[in-house]
Amino acid sequence: MSSRRRFALHTLAVASIAGLATLGLGTAHAQETIKVGVLHSLSGTMAISETVLKDTVLMAIDEINAKGGVLGKKLEAVVVDPASNWPLFAEKARQLVSKDKVAVVFGCWTSVSRKSVLPVFEELNSLLFYPVQYEGEELSKNVFYTGAAPNQQAIPAVEYLMSKDGGAAKRFVLLGTDYVYPRTTNKILRAFLHSKGIADADIMEEYTPFGHGDYQSIIAKIKKFAAEGKKTAVVSTINGDSNVPFYKELGNQGLKATDVPVVAFSVGEEELRGVDTKPLVGHLAAWNYFMSIKSPANTEFVKKWSDYAKAKGIAGHKDKPLTNDPMEATYIGIMMWKQAVEKARSTDTDKVIAAMAGQTVPAPGGFVSTMDPKNHHLHKPVFIGEVKADGQFNVVWKTKGPVKAQPWSPFIAENKGKKDEPEKK
C-alpha cells in the first residue's frame, strides 16, 4: 500500500472517531461516570419533606465515590426539581432516563408522584427506588419500595392504639391529605377496624387538600367527636407542609395526647422542626426508624449526616442536623443498589433487578435490612414513638424484629389470590 493511500485511510479513521465524539458516542467522558437520577421536590408543598432526601442521596454518593465508586467508576448525581407538581414528575423522570441516561433514579415521596412516574419507568425499563411509606396495592418490577407497606406501619399503629398500653381507643378519626395514599390507607384501616368490631358510626374520616393551612374547624370537629363518649384516637396521613399548621392548631386548642392521641405516618423529626413541640408531648408517630434509636450503627449514621450537613452548609441541618425514616430508607436503597450492580457487574436494569433479590445491608436503625427475594420490598421493624419536648421521639413500642411486607392488603377483599411478586412483562 502506498504511503499516500495509508495517509488517506488514517485521515478517514481520525475523522470518523472525531465524528463519533461529536455525537457523544465513544467519548472517554461518557465512560467515566455512572449517572444517578435524583427526583425529589425541592420547592412547593412537599419540599419540607423531600429536600433532605436529595441531600441524603448526595451524601451516599460522596461516600461511595470516596471508596472507589462502583465497577471502578465514580457516581455522578443528576438532580432535578419536579416542584411538587405531579405531572412534572413524569416529565422529569423521562428526561432523567432518556436524555440524561441515568442508570437508576432515587425519588418521589407522595404516591401520586410515584403513580405519575410509574408508566415512564415501565415503558423505558428503568429503575426507581421509592423511599417512603405508602398504601401498598402496587407491585412493579421497575420499582424497589424501601419504605413501609401498610402492615409495616399503619396496621401495627392502630393495633397499638387499641391496646391497653396505647390507650384502648374505641373510636377513630382518619384524617389525611386528599390523594391516593391517605384514601387507600384509610380504606384498609376502615376494613381492619370493622374486623375488630368497630362500627362506621365510630369512625370519622376527613381530608384536606395539599398545602392546607387552616385546621381550626377540623380540630374543633375532632374535639366534638371525641366528647361523645368512647376513647378516641386520631390517625393522621396529612402530608407535607400542612403538618405545621395542623400541629400548631392542635396545641392552640389544647388537644393533648392524654385526651385524644394522634398517631402520624408522615411526620418525623424534619416535619416537627418548625413547630413548638412542648404542647405535643405524648402524641405519636409510627415509623421504621427514629433518630433517637440507640445502636452503634445509628450513632455512626447520625454522625455521618451531621458532618456532611455541616460541611455542605445544608440549610437548617448545619446547626441542627436531624435524621429520619425516609432518609434511612433512601440510604439503604442506594447501598443495596450499589451491591446489586457489583454483583451483576452491570448497570443493566434486568441484571440489577435479579441481583437485588435477597440483598442485605446493615441498617442505621440497628438491624440487618433485607430485600425480599420476590416482592421488591424491605423486611422492616416497626417502631412507635412519642413526641418529646425537644422534637425527638421516645420509642414506646416495637416489633421483635423485621416484618415482611404485604403489598396486597388482606383487608381488601379483591386482593384475594394476587401474587406477592411483580408480574413478568
Image: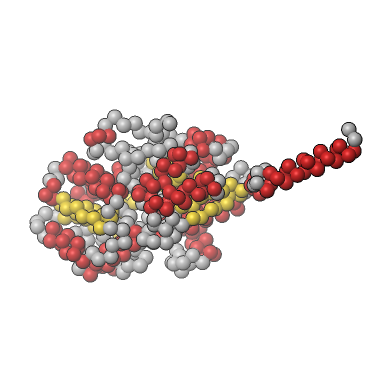
* Residue drawn at (42%, 61%) of the image: 43
Question: What x and y, as percent, mark residue 202?
Answer: 13, 50
Q: Quadrant of residue 72?
A: top right
Question: What x and y, as percent, mark residue 373?
Answer: 43, 34
Residue 291 appears in the picture as rendered: no
Quarter holding the C terminus is: top left
Residue 320 vertical position relative to residue 144 in the rendered view, above or below: below
Which residue is at the front of the view, 10 or 328?
A: 10
* Residue drawn at (25%, 58%) of the image: 208
Residue 8 appears in the picture as rendered: yes
274 sits to left or right of 196: right
* Residue drawn at (42%, 31%) of the image: 424
Question: What x and y, as percent, mark residue 61?
Answer: 54, 52
94 sits to left or right of 392: right
Which residue is at the front of the view, 132 or 124?
A: 124
* Residue drawn at (70%, 45%) of the image: 19
